[in-house]
Image (cartoon, grey):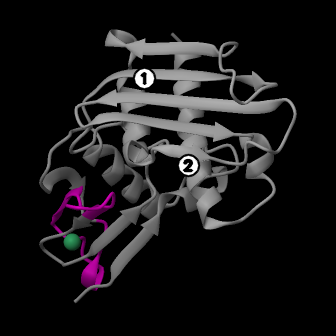
Amino acid sequence: MANTWITDMTHFLDAEGRIAAQLLSRRLIHHLGSIVAAVTSESAETSRELEIKCRRKPGRKPCPGTIHAGFEPGTSNIIWHCPVCGDRGLIQRWQSTPWDKGARPELPKIQRVTYRRGMLSDPEDLSGLESTVLEGPALSREIIVAIHDNELLGASGNYGDPLVGDPLQYDELIIEHTGGTTRIALFNRAIMLFTTDDEFYKQVHRVCCAIDKVVDATQNL
Ligand SMILES: [Zn+2]
């Protein structure tokens, strides 16, 4: 039985999220990146044969197999194998890498996303917030993928400490979807993110990153 390669695609990126220059020529990385690109080009729910040759050379002869790959059911991993030689692997954290073509096996049905943000001098008074509403064509696939990848639909609640900071930084995301409405409010995200390593705040950080993606997408419209 061949080894199972467990790969985290973010290990191949530099600080700016680009493919690290010194790694570009490595065959294994090209091979794994091609698998991610092929799988995320179609939202197929089952593993399928890709147009990618097996890279192994058992006994110095190239394996004649082609790679089968797909989204692992119930997780966000991509799994692949060669049916001829048994080479196989599992790929993690490929989302939003240069190889990610954006397809997912199942995306949430979202009707509207409202993003409100601003600085508050009174936590009870939300009237001065800047508001962005995304629906119809403005609610791009990229935003829905970001919400899906960051598991935002289950993250309703208030995050952060409303008693820290004056004025108070406030971010709020309201997601209307077929399962109901998810409302996420963040207090003082900038202060919180850099002052703790707690697991709770890592969850908040994921929420913040997804909100940034929503805002970036809005500004690019
Ligand atoms: Zn093979």
* Disc nearest the viewer among 1 and 2: 1
* Displayed quadrant of residue 111: top left
The residue tagged with tag 1: helix, strand or loop?
Answer: strand
- Residue located 22% across and 32% down the image: 178
Q: Give left or right: position of 111 versus 51.
A: right
Q: Give left or right: position of 139 versus 126.
A: left
For disc 2, the marked residue is 206
Indicate the position of residue 115 as horizontal and vertical percent values. 54, 23
Q: Quick one: 124 or 83, which is closer to the camera?
A: 124
* Displayed quadrant of residue 106: top left
- Residue located 48% across and 43% down the image: 96
Q: Quick one: 167 or 178, which is closer to the camera?
A: 167
* Amino acid under disc 2: Arg
Q: Give left or right: position of 46 versus 158.
A: left
Q: Give left or right: position of 20 versus 190.
A: left
- Residue lying at the far front of the rendered structure: 124
Query: Which span is picked out in magenta?
Result: 55-79
Indicate whether residue 77 is drawn in magenta.
yes
Q: Quick one: 156 or 205, which is closer to the camera?
A: 156
Q: Quick one: 70 or 184, which is closer to the camera?
A: 184
Indicate the position of residue 15 as horizontal and vertical percent values. 70, 49
Quadrant of the displayed image that contains ligand 1:
bottom left
- Residue located 26% across and 48% down the image: 39
- Residue located 82% across and 25% down the image: 121
Tag of residue 113: 1
Q: Report if residue 19 is visible in the image.
A: no
The residue tagged with tag 2: helix, strand or loop?
Answer: helix
* Amino acid under disc 1: Val
